[in-house]
């Protein structure tokens, strides 16, 4: 396995996305690809709504805000703030809605008194720039998986497999989902709860991410899907530390790499490889490294089967939750405040991941629910080695109309066996911005990290 050449001056920090493992795959035919922009949206979702009208047709997404000043310092006004829930789902009526609830959601409703879903009218708000749509159309007939699914070739600047043939291609799409060319989260916070019901702020950082894959000036030559820099703001013992990560587009050709700047020593060190089911300490021991974004890193330990599509209630258009000013009102002892989370009915791809024979992992099986419009994993179910449902994951999508990109960085997991949970990458009142000016490649190198290090 090759590492990135030293001439590459890029970073990637995805605490990880997904790269696929499995058999190689070929692109679709030109006739099949012609469906894009017609009965399928330009990124491969079904354009039509459902017969009941509870999933609306796709009409182009949300590309403008409710007012000229609807974005202030990265905080977006909720365009649906005046809407009221259509109904709520709790332990008393979940059986009537079970066909549209993930196994993890059902377990939370049954096991946590007071937990509920407020279901609102669905809005298909996800939208992408024309360049992304154009590249997606090109990728449809040229992208292919390589090295048994660990990598891919032929994809550039768009969704690699808008008409997926298998679970591997769906997961590759989640890895290469569009989130703009750059994002800045000035206050990227992680909260978890312990068994006593205490809410703990475990980590705060400023997180800058750039996506060379979606930057037309770099996408043809860069081996990176993204590069990111995380500067620690809390706890006090970590202030001044900086983490640099390069995330590869193809694990068949490169490995993820980390560097850390230690201000006390004024030096940069290589961070040993982390991944798979290593416990992620900032989550209170609840999440694994590859739980990040509901799945991250290599897909070498699981087999991925595409089950099909279904309609599912998922967190969606979560503006009120994302930008709330008071975290003590957001994070309750057993779950995120149901008053602040908007749930909608959307179509999702369902992918079943089963641990390979002889492979080691905390989970024996995982189910991923992938949004057809954004290619983001919106919910997941995780099963322990005894086959028992042990954790339920959710991510919280909302559309940044000012950047024509969805924001799905905030995610978390509920430990169903111990009644605790965490939420990571929550922006709060600091918001999320999309820098127009990208930083030079040299600033994304280990040498650049050392040069900018101060305490």
Image (cartoon, rainbow, N blue to C red):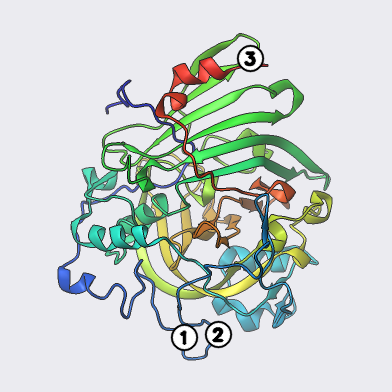
In the rendered image, which residue does mark 1 sit on?
Answer: 50
Quadrant, the C terminus:
top right
- From the viewer's perspective, is 379 left or right of 372? right
Q: CA distance from mark 2 to mark 1?
A: 7 Å
Mark nearer the N terminus (2 vs 3)? 2
Q: Earlier in the sequence, mark 1 or mark 3?
A: 1
Q: Nearer the viewer, residue 274 or 26?
A: 26
How far apart in space, not on screen, are marks 1 and 3 (Cα)?
Answer: 55 Å
Residue 319 seen in this snapshot: yes
Q: Choose mark 1 or mark 3, whichever is in front.
A: 3
Crowd rating for badge 1 (residues with CA inside 10 Å; few <14, some 14–19, many 20+): some
Q: Is residue 302 left or right of residue 210?
A: left
Circle 2: element type: loop
Q: Residues within 10 Å of mark 2 (few under 14, many from 20)?
A: some
- Marks 2 and 3 sit apart, C-alpha to C-alpha, by 53 Å
State if disc 3 and disc 1 touch (CB < 8 Å). Answer: no
* Quadrant hosting residue 75: bottom right
Camera-nearest residue between 219 and 51: 219
The correct choice, above or below, for 224 with respect to 125 in the image is above
Q: Which mark is residue 117?
A: none
Q: Residues within 10 Å of mark 3 (few under 14, many from 20)?
A: some
Instruction: Give the number of the mark in front: 2 or 3.
Output: 3
Estimate the x, y position of residue 111 in percent, counting from the top left: 72, 63
Q: Position of residue 173 (x, y in %)?
A: 37, 56
Please say if the residues under marks 2 and 1 sit with CB atoms less than 8 Å apart.
yes
Give the secondary structure at mark 3. loop
Residue carrying label 3 = 263
> Which residue is label 2 attached to?
54
Q: Position of residue 264 (x, y in %)?
A: 65, 11
């Amino acid at each position: 396995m090759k590492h990135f050449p030293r001439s590459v001056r890029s970073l990637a920090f995805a605490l990880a996305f997904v790269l696929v493992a499995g058999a190689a795959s070929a692109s679709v035919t030109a006739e099949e690809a012609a469906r894009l922009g017609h009965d399928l949206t330009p990124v491969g979702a079904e354009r039509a709504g459902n017969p009941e009208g509870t999933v609306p047709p796709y009409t182009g997404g949300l590309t403008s805000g409710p007012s000229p000043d609807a974005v202030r310092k990265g905080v977006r006004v909720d365009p649906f703030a005046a809407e009221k829930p259509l109904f709520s789902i709790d332990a008393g009526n979940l059986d009537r809605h079970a066909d549209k609830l993930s196994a993890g959601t059902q377990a939370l409703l049954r096991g946590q008194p007071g937990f509920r879903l407020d279901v609102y009218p669905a809005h298909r708000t996800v939208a992408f720039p024309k360049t992304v749509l154009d590249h997606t159309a090109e990728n449809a007939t040229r992208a292919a998986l390589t090295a048994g699914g660990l990598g891919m070739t032929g994809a550039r600047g768009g969704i690699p497999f808008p008409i997926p043939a298998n679970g591997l291609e769906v997961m590759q799409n989640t890895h290469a989902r569009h989130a703009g060319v750059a994002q800045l989260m000035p206050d990227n916070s992680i909260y978890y709860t312990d068994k006593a019901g205490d809410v703990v702020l475990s980590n705060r950082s400023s997180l800058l991410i750039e996506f060379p894959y979606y930057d037309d000036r770099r996408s043809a030559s860069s081996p990176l899907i993204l590069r990111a820099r995380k500067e620690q703001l809390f706890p006090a013992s970590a202030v001044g530390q900086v983490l640099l990560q390069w995330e590869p587009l193809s694990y068949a050709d490169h490995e993820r790499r980390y560097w850390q700047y230690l201000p006390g020593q004024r030096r940069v060190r290589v961070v040993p490889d982390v991944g798979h089911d290593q416990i992620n300490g900032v989550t209170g021991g609840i999440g694994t490294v590859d739980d990040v974004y509901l799945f991250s890193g290599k897909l070498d330990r699981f087999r991925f089967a595409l089950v099909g599509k279904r309609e599912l209630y998922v967190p969606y258009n979560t503006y009120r939750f994302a930008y709330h000013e008071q975290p003590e009102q957001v994070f309750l002892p057993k779950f995120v405040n149901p008053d602040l989370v908007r749930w909608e009915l959307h179509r999702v791809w369902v992918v079943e991941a089963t641990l390979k024979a002889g492979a080691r992992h905390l989970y024996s099986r995982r189910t991923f629910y992938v949004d057809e419009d954004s290619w983001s994993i919106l919910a997941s179910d995780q099963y322990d080695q005894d086959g028992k449902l042990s954790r339920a994951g959710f991510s919280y999508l909302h559309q940044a109309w000012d950047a024509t990109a969805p924001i799905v960085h905030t995610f978390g997991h509920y430990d169903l066996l111990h009644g605790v949970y965490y939420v990571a990458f929550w922006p709060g009142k600091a918001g999320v911005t999309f820098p127009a000016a990208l930083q030079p490649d040299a600033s994304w190198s280990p040498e650049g990290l050392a040069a900018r290090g101060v305490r």
